[in-house]
Amino acid sequence: MLKAVFGVVALVLASAALAERVDNFVLLDHTGDAHELHYYSDRDAVVLMVQGNGCPVVRNALPDLRAVREQFSDANVEFLMINSNLQDHRVSIAAEAEEWGIDLPILDDDSQLIGESLGLTRTAEVFVIDTDDWSVAYRGPINDRLSYERQKKEASKHYVADALNAVLAGEEPSITSEGAIGCLINFPGEKEREAHRTISYSDTIAPMLEDNCVACHQEGGIGPWAMSSYEMVRGFAPMIREVVRTKRMPPWHADPHVGDWQNDAGLTVEERQTLIHWIEAGAPRGEGDDPLKMFVADANIWPLGEPDLIVELPSYDIPASGVVDYQFPSVKNPLDEDVWVRAMTVVPGRTEVVHHVLVGATAAGQAPNESEGVFDNYLGGYAPGTGYTKMPEGTGVYLPADSHFMFQLHYTPFGKDVSDTTKVGLYFHDEPPGNFLRHGVVLNPTIRIPPGAKRHEQAAYYQFEKDAHLHTILPHSHYRGRSSSFVLRHPDGTEEMLLNVPNYDFNWQRGYDFAEPKFVPAGSKLIHSTVYDNSVQNPANPDPEKLVTWGLQSWDEMLYGDFVFTWVDETSDQPIHSNERADAFQTIGFLDRDMDGTVQLEELSDRMRQRMAPIFQAADHNKDGLSAEEYIAFRMVMRMNRPQRNASSGGE
Ligand code: HEC
């Protein structure tokens, strides 16, 4: 009797020091996929096992974990693993998973912050998390089969299975924790909790916020609150902890393990650790000045200086709420000579409502033609936080006289009626810069995203017919975009991932500028893929019951991968680019589902097959599928044979 009472007391004491609830987090797994804990709110429980490379206890427990998964395969339970080891990284974790046949996502806790907050000490510990309130229903070994250097043939106590049964039955498990048995994890941060109180706000935290956050979080900025003093930061400290743990802020969404970006706006692992440790230590003020109080915003709306040409867009009245259709205004280019654009700044009239702006120009003498004209002579874009576009060294966008500026404007109401007049400032080269900066798109207008699908992938590619350099890539989808990537498939078939955006966020349309121009050998395919989440678990989803197809509005979807490039053999006095050919390569890139370079009729949807069958008949000369060259030749013939348009046939 007495013993039992002591047992209870000991248990209460032990668990007091441990996490009782698991705060939300986002971590990338060993394959580069993002996992948000709270995304699994439609599950009844989440089982999270602490993994560590080379730990015999973990390896030995794997068959038992598999058995529990099997036992609960009909139940609504999510199984995950987490690795908080200092010494393990994405590649070595992936190798361990491969070698030991682990087919669960292993979340890479690269900053150790999540492991610290769970109070981990050893690997092989298993958490049973009740998704009703994210409480820890059980933590400890999976069962009593294993102890150090010996193991029983069979377990007699099945802690995790019992806890799961209890949670599924809406009951409290009879055993809520057991001492973990596994390999010790080195948490240097944990041992220095006291030292975190001495992290200097003045010398370390404020400068970090100034460098990474204040561009948006200042008076009149697009951030909802201004980081204008220590008091503000302290007040928002728990919220900062949350948005950093869930990778919402700063809004930079590239997987840090893939690619090097000139405009990298992410926090490093060390910066995240320092910021969170400081907050968890109580956000102490310490000694010294308050740099955030002394911060003076740059009042100059033209960060690159007075532009050579300022173009004012038409004004729009934006209602307090509702959805505003995309706007496609155009403005006649007032210049009477051709110029080369070297940089551009977009200045929204009201930063609160301007979601994004794309800017382009038509060819000489061409009338504006709604949306697509934006991409003929694409100049660049604006999204909150991206101040200006500078063309890469030695390049420029050629802007002919007698053209029209084209814009695509996306407004999002914010609760007040306002009027917006956006301005664009252009900067010109004095001399032709050497090369044309070109723009292309990988797209797929045939996408169909089934209702309720959690992970629906669509892809397309663009094949480069000549050597090129890529400068910027930009994945674009709408509210259902979950993740996106760009992969370069070399002519020899080897693939290289250029960009991985594991937790895509429609709110942040931004280009990723390569630190060094990326060489693309002729014949390479730039493959763009997006995974869509059309389920109720996607909080941004406007309608999970809808079959979603291509459309400009944000409740429709897009597979749209922008890329900015130069042809290696092009010069400003000897253009070699052809929009016509680019169009054909773009079309083949979404029709050719198996990406082997030619389109077979079987690859097309029924509707497309009907439409394309006559073209195939006429164009596919060697009957081995339609290639881009055949398609180009066919279109040329069609154009030559087309009767001259006149006013009476204009209604088509
Ligand atoms: C490019 C602009 C931008 C940058 C840089 C930026 N933020 Fe934000 N931040 C926003 C916007 C816009 C919102 C509100 C909408 C959203 O959450 O996306 C926001 C929201 C937040 C919120 C949530 C406020 C709330 O109550 O919902 C916090 C906290 C925050 N930011 C902290 C930070 C921190 C810390 C940094 C730097 C490490 C940072 N932000 C960098 C634009 C930015």
Image (tube, grey):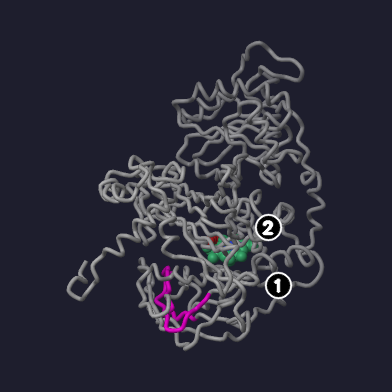
- Residue range (magenta): 398-423
Local secondary structure at mark 2: loop
Residue 407 visible, this orientation: yes
Name the residue that disc number 2 marks: 267
Residue type for callout 1? Leu
Q: Is residue 625 left or right of residue 525?
A: left
Residue at mark 2 to residue at mark 1: CA–CA distance: 19 Å
Name the residue that disc number 1 marks: 292
Residue 37 placement (x, y as % from top left): 55, 43
Q: Is residue 642 left or right of residue 634?
A: left
Residue 260 placement (x, y as % from top left): 67, 56
Image point (19%, 70%), residue name:
649
Q: Nearer the viewer, residue 542 or 276?
A: 542
Are the two marked residues, 2 and 1, in contact with CB atoms closer than 8 angstroms? Answer: no
Local secondary structure at mark 1: helix
Task: In the rendered view, tell whether residue 10 sits above or below residue 489.
Answer: above
Q: Nearer the viewer, mark 2 or mark 1?
A: 2
Residue type for callout 2? Leu
Q: Could you classify mark 2 by the number of other residues whose Cα lies within 10 Å: few (under 14), some (14-19), or many (20 or more)?
A: many
Which quadrant of the rendered structure holds the C terminus?
Answer: bottom left
Q: Is mark 2 within 8 Å of ligand 1?
A: yes
| Mark closer to the chain start, 2 or 1 | 2
Residue 442 placement (x, y as % from top left): 46, 56
